[in-house]
Amino acid sequence: MKPHPPPATADVGHAPPAAPDMVPEGTADPIPAGLGRRNEPVDCAIIGGGPAGLSAAVYLGRMRRSTLVFDDRAGRSLWSQVNRNYLGFPDGVEAAELRRLGRRQAARYGTGFYDGCVNRITREDGLFRVRVGPSDSSGDGAGTDRNVELERAEGEELGETEVQRRREFWAATIILALGVTDEFPDFLGRDECVGRSLFWCIICDGYEAIDRRVVVVGHDEEAVSTALQLRQFSNTITLVAGRVGFSVPAARLADLAAADIESFAYPVTDYPNEEGCLSAIRLADRAHTLLPLDLIFAIVPKHPNTGLAQRLKVKLDANGYIAADSEQKTNVPGVYAAGDATRLHSHQISSAVHEGGMAAAAANYYLYGDLQKPH
C-alpha cells in the first residue's frame, strides 16, 4: 500500500490511489524519502507527537494521506502518569505506553517520524514551508529519562529520523498539536514523582486520592477549590500556599476551615521522596514543619506552547491558547490545531485524541479537489 496518492489534477485534487499491495499486519509502508520537498509536498505536517498529533496521523493515514510527525519529546505524555479514564483500558494505561502504541499504529499507515524541533512555518505559494532543527538536549523538557529512552529506541525500529542540522520540508496542510508546559515545583527526584505521587488534574487522578493523605500546593482560588473538591475523595486534605500568603479572600480560608482542611501560608523548602513516591513536604516556617503525605496536587501555571502558532499568524484566545473551531480549524486556511494547546480546561487524553481526529478530518477535506466536494 502506498500511503500517499498521486499528484493532484486541476479538477479532482488527489486522484484515487492504485489498489494496495498486500502488506503484513503491523508492517509500515514508509513514505518515500523524497516526499516533503517543494515539488512533492507531504499532505500534512503534524507538529507534536502526543495523543492529539498521533491520532491525527492515524486518521490521515487511513484516508491515504501522507503525513510527517515532528516531535522533540518535550510533552506531557512522556511523564509517568497512568491514565485510568480512557475507555477500553480497565486496568489503566501509562500515557507514555499509549503514545508508543499510537506511534506504531500511525507507522502502520505510513506516517514518517522526525525527532526535531520545528522553529518556523511560513506559507509560500499555497504550501507550508516547515523549518526544523535539532531537538533541545538541555534536559529541561517534560518526561522521565526512561520514557524518553524507550521512545527513542522504538523510534529506531519505526525508522524515525533524528534531525541533526537545519532542514526544511513542504506540506499542503499543517496540524498544530503543540501541547502545554507545566511549572511543577523543582526538587531532586521530581521527574520520577510526576504522575506517580505528584499530580495536577483532579479529573484524571482524584480517584487515586481516596482515603489518602493529600496536600494541595497552591495559593489562588483554583488551589482552594481543588482542595475543597478533593474532599469528595479524602478526609485528610491540607492546603499549602507554596509561597508567603494566599491570594484569596479570608472568607475562602474560612471555607477551608469549615471543611476541616488545614491551610499553611508558607513556601515549601523540601519534598522528601524515594523512587517516585513523595512522603512529606517541609515548610519554611519557624518550626520547619514536616507534613507527612501520600499525594500532592500541584496547582501550577500552564503555558500553552503557541509561539510557533503566533509566528504563523494563528489567532490565540485571551489566555494564549489557539482559537480553533469545532472542526479544529484556525483562522489560517490549511492550518488546524488539536490537543491541550487549544483550550484552557479539559486537558484530557481522550479530548486530545478526539480533537486530533477532527483536525485530520478537516485537513483531509481541505485536500479534496473541487469535484470531490458537494456542489
Image (spheres, rainbow, N blue to C red):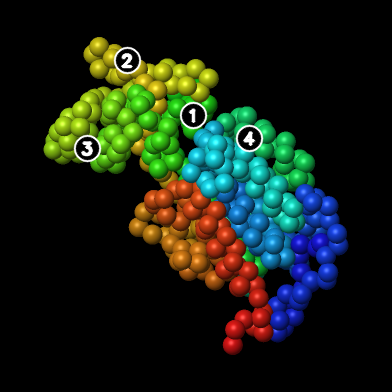
User: Earlier along the polypeptide chain: callout 1 or callout 3?
Assistant: 1
Q: Estimate the x, y position of residue 84 in percent, counting from the top left.
A: 50, 40
Q: Residue at x 57, y 31 (%)?
A: 144
Identify the residue position indicated by label 3 in the image.
247
What amino acid is found at the position of numbered circle 1 in the picture?
A: Arg
Q: Position of residue 255 (x, y in %)?
A: 17, 36
Q: Which residue, given by chain and number where applicable, does mark 1 sit on? A: 196
Disc 1 from disc 2: Cα separation: 21 Å
Expressed as whole percent of the image width and height from the top left, the position of residue 293 reads 36, 21
- Between discs 3 and 2, the one toward the N terminus: 3
Q: Amino acid at mark 2?
A: Leu
Q: CA distance from mark 1 to mark 3?
A: 28 Å
Q: Residue furthest right?
A: 21
What residue is at 57 percent from the left and 42 percent from the top?
A: 89
Closer to the eye: label 1 or 3: 1
Element type where label 3 sits in the image: loop
Tag nearer the camera, 1 or 2: 1
- Name above or below for residue 194 compared with residue 73: above
Q: Which residue is mark 4?
A: 148
Which of these two is toward me, 265 or 41?
A: 265
**Relative to residue 111, is residue 281 drawn left or right?**
left
Q: Which residue is mark 2?
A: 290
